[in-house]
Amino acid sequence: MQTEATAQAIARFRAEAGDYARQFGFGGYTLREVSVNTDGGAPMPEPRFRVAMAAAKVGDGESLPVEAGKGSVTATVAGSIQLK
């Protein structure tokens, strides 16, 4: 899922860079700098008192309840281009 999000973000960056080059009357662009950042949807850290409370509710030998769910992944691509 993270790889797909990253690929989509890179494709969008490239498409927009090409559009900007054409709008300014250039035939293309050269990539100068690029930064790719992803957030794999890792859970947010919980305050220690919540963790302690959750641990207190679970007795010895009991399993923690687990539910299926959805996560989110974000990918951000930022960079600079040189029009040519």
Image (spheres, rainbow, N blue to C red):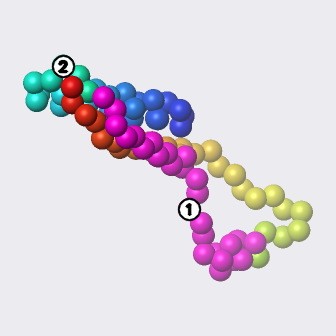
- Dot 1: few (<14), some (14–19), or many (≥20) neighbours within 10 Å? few
Frontmost residue, 61 versus 15: 15
| Highlighted range, magenta | 30-55
Numbered tag placed on residue 27 in the rendering: 2
Query: What's the CA distance linking mark 1 and mark 2?
Result: 45 Å
| Residue name at image x 62 percent, y 44 percent | 68
**Circle 1: element type:** loop
State the image quarter where residue 49 is shown. Answer: bottom right
For label 2, count other residues whose C-alpha is less than 10 Å away and answer few (under 14), some (14-19) or many (20+): few
Give the percent coordinates (x, y) of residue 23. 11, 28
Closer to us: 82 or 15: 82
Above or below 15: residue 58: below
Image point (89%, 63%), residue name: 61
Residue at the disc numbered 1: 44
Please state if 82 lies on the left or on the right of 50 as rendered. left
Q: Amino acid at mark 2?
A: Gly
- Which amino acid type is marked by label 1? Met
**53 or 40, which lies in front?**
40
Q: How many marks?
A: 2
From the top left corner, tell me how far across and down residue 80 is, in percent: 30, 41
- Residue 51 colored in magenta in the image: yes
Q: Position of residue 82 (x, y in %)?
A: 25, 34
Q: Nearer the viewer, mark 1 or mark 2?
A: 2
